[in-house]
Amino acid sequence: MQYWFVTDPGCVRTANQDACTVEQLDKNTLLCVVCDGMGGAKSGNVASTLAMEVFIQEVKRTWKPDMDPDLQDRMLQGAVKLANFTVYDQSRQFEEFSGMGTTLVAVLVQNHFATFANVGDSRAYKIDSSGIQQVTVDHSLVQMMVERGELTPEMARLYPGKNYITRAVGTDTLTECDVFHRRMEKGSFLLLCSDGLSNLLDDQELLFEVAHGVDKKQCCQSLLDIAKSRGAPDNVTCVLIGL
């Protein structure tokens, strides 16, 4: 497996409230997480970094190479719960961090099997010879409206309240994370990103850059460059994993 990532404040904001990392647990296993903080420049950065670090540490503490899928699911859910408790606890202890929170999308890739955990509207995509598939489902107001038939996906991209999320890490005592699974074929890719990227590039544009980019090392930078050419009003983070 290979991986590449980039994170950038974008064209408008001076602070980067996104956080991301990739950890190699062994030669066959990668753990990746992307967080998009909220709550002001300072506290948003604290929330995303803290959630990322706690999540990674807890997975590294509990992970074993021979875990079955059910145990992996519970491990990721437990790591999200601990990250949520830690961020929420900090927000209650320090007035300057009051109300902070973060999205979290993560994937554990072991050999040819990927397990995803998601809270909020940062996303994970799978890209292979059949095209691009959004694996995660946004926890957002517009997604709820799409599911109720009040908006089409095309209308949702332009809806004024599209940045309002309905679930986050650290904003309440408890949070729920969704878990997804995908089989990975040789030559396939996973793309994880904050909404600073997915708000500006549609699925087909993401597919084109990943599938047709000659130098995969430059793919994340190319996606960032496109987002910045369109104004990048938010922080932009993306991680690409290739088998």
Image: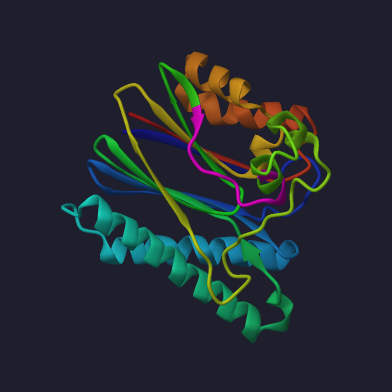
Q: Is residue 227 above or below residue 41?
A: above
Q: Is residue 210 above or below residue 101?
A: above
| Residue 155 locus on image (x, y percent) | 77, 32
Q: Is residue 243 above or below residue 105?
A: above
- Residue 3 sits in quarter: top left
Q: Is residue 213 left or right of residue 114?
A: right
Q: Quadrant of the N terminus?
A: top left
Residues 85 and 4: in front is: 85
Q: Residue at x 74, y 54 (%)?
A: 164
- Residue 206 sits in quarter: top right
| Residue 143 locus on image (x, y percent) | 66, 44
Q: Residue at x 60, y 61 (%)?
A: 168
Would residue 141 be counted in the magenta stretch?
A: yes
| Residue 190 locus on image (x, y percent) | 44, 33
Specify the farthest residue to the bottom.
93
Q: Is residue 150 left or right of residue 120?
A: right
| Residue 87 locus on image (x, y percent) | 56, 72
Specify the farthest residue to the left.
66
Would residue 218 be counted in the magenta stretch?
A: no
Q: Is residue 237 left or right of residue 156?
A: left
Q: Which residues are magenta?
A: 133-143
Q: Residue at x 67, y 63 (%)?
A: 44
Specify the farthest residue to the right.
160
Q: Quadrant of the C terminus?
A: top left
Q: Residue at x 57, y 64 (%)?
A: 169
